[in-house]
Image (tube, rainbow, N blue to C red):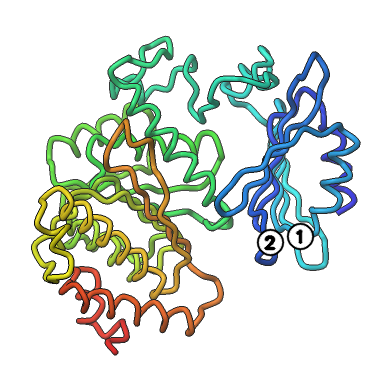
C-alpha cells in the first residue's frame, strides 16, 4: 500500500490525466472516485468526483488535502487506476492491504494530444469522449461517422455520442471481466457494427485486452461488409456471422453479451442465451417492446390502456422492469440506466447486469415472487420468463 501511495504522490502533477478509485469492499456510500487535475486561477488543484448510487459530489483539493483523502479512503476499495501522459497504472488491493500493481507504457495518440495541449486541465472543458473528435479512427471514417481528418460528420453526431456513451459503460464493467485469459464478447443484432468495432478498438487497441468479439445479424450483406472491414483494419478477432439470436450455438462460453436495439422478444432470447452461458456482464438496450402490449388485461388500468400511446409506454416500462427483475432472480446485480439523452433517441434505457460473485438465495426467492405476482396481476407471460420456466430454471410459486 505504501508503494502505491508513493506512486500516486509522484504523479499528482499536470501530466496526470485521471485517478480512479473504485470497487468498494463493503456497501460504502461512495461507489467510485474520479480525480483529475485542473487549473483554477492558474493554480493547480485536484477535482474529486465522488459517485454515490444516485448522485455525484464534486470538490477541489490541494495536493496535500488530496493525499490525506486518498490515504484515508484507499483501504476501503479494491481497485485503483492512474492514467498519466506516459503510463497507465492499475492496482488491485487485497484484504490485507497489499497492492498488486501493473504499469503499462502509454502509447496512445489520443492521450498524447490531451497532454500536449493541456486541455485536460481546463476547469470548464468540453465533454471528454473516449474517442475524441480530432483523432481519426479508421472504422469511424469507413462507417461515415468521421472524416479522414477526424472531424465528426454533422448528421452522425448522435451516433458518435452514442458510441462514446456505450464505451463509458464498457469502461465501468472492466473490473468484472477476466484479466488472465481471452475475453469473449457477443454482440447480438450487431447491424453495421458501430459498437462492435468501437468495443474492439477500445479494448484491444487502447486497453491492450486479449479479446474476441462475435457479431451476429440477420442481414447477409451487412455481415459481409463487416467481415470485409475487419480484414481491412487487420483485426483478426472480430468475427461476424449471419443468423438469428435464438438459434445461435457457435460458442460455449461468453463473458459479456451486448444487445443494442434488438427488436421486441429478440432481446429476451439474447438475455436467455447470456444466462445460459453465465455471462459475467450483460449490457442490453431494448427496443420495440410489443409483446406485453398484446397481453395486458386488467380493468383497473383502463385510464392507461384505453389510450394507445400510454398503453405502449406502460408496457415498454413493464417489459424492461420484468427483464431486470428476472436477471436479479438469476443471480445478477441489475440496474436500468439512461443510455443517451431522450432528445437523441427514445430508446434510451440500458439494462446493465453484473453476475453476483456470492449467490443469494434470499434475493433469488424475493425476485421470483415479485415477477410472478406482477405478471399474474396484469396478465403478462413474457418470453424470457417462459423460457426459464420451461427448463425449470425459476421458482413458479
Vertical position of residue 29 compared to residue 363: above or below? above
Bin the neighbour count of mark 1 within 10 Å (Cα to Cα): few under 14, some 14-19, many 20 and up. some
- In the picture of the structure, the residue carrying the numbered disc 1 is 76
Residue 62, percent from left and from top: 86, 31
The residue at which mark 2 appears reads as: 28
The tag on residue 349 is none
| Foreground label between 1 and 2 | 2
Left-right relation of 306 to 392: left
Q: Along the line of sight, which residue is nearer the eye, 330 or 254?
A: 330
Q: In which quarter of the image is the N terminus?
A: bottom right
Query: Vertical placement of 80 versus 281: above or below?
Result: above
Q: Do the residues labelled 1 and 2 touch (CB within 8 Å)?
A: yes
Residue 203, position as x, y percentages in the image: 49, 41
What residue lies at 82% left-to-right and 31% top-to-bottom? 12
Residue 132 seen in render: yes
* Residue 306 drawn at (x, y percent): 9, 57
Given residues 108 and 273, the one toward you in this image is 273
Work out which residue is located at the far top of the displayed protein and give it.
149
Task: In the rendered view, tell whether residue 196 sits above or below residue 140.
Answer: below
Report helix, strand or loop for mark 1: helix
Amino acid at each position: 500500500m505504501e508503494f502505491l501511495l508513493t506512486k500516486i504522490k509522484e504523479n499528482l502533477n499536470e501530466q496526470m490525466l485521471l485517478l480512479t478509485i473504485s470497487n468498494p469492499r463493503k456497501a460504502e456510500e461512495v461507489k467510485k472516485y474520479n480525480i483529475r487535475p485542473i487549473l483554477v486561477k492558474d493554480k493547480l488543484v485536484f477535482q474529486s468526483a465522488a459517485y454515490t448510487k444516485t448522485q455525484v459530489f464534486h470538490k477541489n483539493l490541494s495536493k496535500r488535502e488530496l493525499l490525506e483523502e486518498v490515504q484515508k479512503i484507499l483501504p476501503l476499495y479494491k481497485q485503483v487506476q492512474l492514467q498519466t501522459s506516459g503510463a497507465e497504472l492499475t492496482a488491485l488491493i487485497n484484504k490485507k492491504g497489499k497492492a498488486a500493481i501493473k504499469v503499462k507504457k502509454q502509447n496512445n495518440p489520443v492521450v498524447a494530444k490531451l497532454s500536449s495541449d493541456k486541455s485536460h486541465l481546463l476547469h470548464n472543458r468540453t465533454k471528454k469522449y473516449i474517442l475524441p473528435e480530432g483523432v481519426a479512427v479508421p472504422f469511424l471514417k469507413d462507417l461515415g461517422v468521421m472524416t479522414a481528418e477526424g472531424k465528426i460528420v454533422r448528421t452522425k453526431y448522435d451516433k458518435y455520442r452514442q458510441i462514446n456513451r456505450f464505451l463509458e459503460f464498457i469502461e465501468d464493467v472492466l473490473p468484472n471481466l477476466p484479466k488472465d485469459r481471452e475475453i469473449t464478447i457477443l454482440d447480438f443484432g450487431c447491424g453495421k457494427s458501430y459498437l462492435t468495432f468501437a468495443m474492439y478498438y477500445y479494448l484491444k487497441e487502447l486497453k491492450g485486452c486479449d479479446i474476441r468479439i462475435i457479431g451476429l445479424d440477420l442481414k447477409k450483406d451487412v455481415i459481409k461488409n463487416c467481415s470485409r472491414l475487419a480484414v481491412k483494419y487487420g483485426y483478426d478477432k472480430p468475427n461476424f456471422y449471419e443468423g438469428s439470436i435464438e438459434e445461435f450455438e457457435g460458442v460455449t462460453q461468453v463473458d459479456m453479451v451486448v444487445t443494442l436495439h434488438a427488436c421486441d422478444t429478440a432481446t429476451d432470447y439474447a438475455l436467455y442465451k447470456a444466462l445460459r452461458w453465465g455471462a459475467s456482464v450483460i449490457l442490453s438496450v431494448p427496443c420495440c417492446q410489443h409483446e406485453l402490449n398484446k397481453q395486458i388485461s386488467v380493468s383497473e388500468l383502463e385510464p392507461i390502456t384505453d389510450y394507445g400511446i400510454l398503453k405502449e409506454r406502460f408496457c415498454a416500462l413493464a417489459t424492461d422492469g420484468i427483464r431486470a427483475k428476472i436477471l436479479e432472480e438469476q443471480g445478477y446485480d441489475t440496474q436500468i440506466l439512461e443510455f443517451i439523452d431522450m432528445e437523441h433517441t427514445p430508446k434510451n434505457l440500458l439494462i446493465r447486469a453484473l453476475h453476483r460473485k456470492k449467490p443469494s438465495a434470499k434475493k433469488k426467492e424475493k425476485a421470483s415472487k415479485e415477477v410472478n405476482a406482477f405478471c399474474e396481476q396484469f396478465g403478462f407471460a413474457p418470453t424470457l420468463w417462459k423460457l426459464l420456466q420451461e427448463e425449470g430454471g425459476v421458482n413458479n410459486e
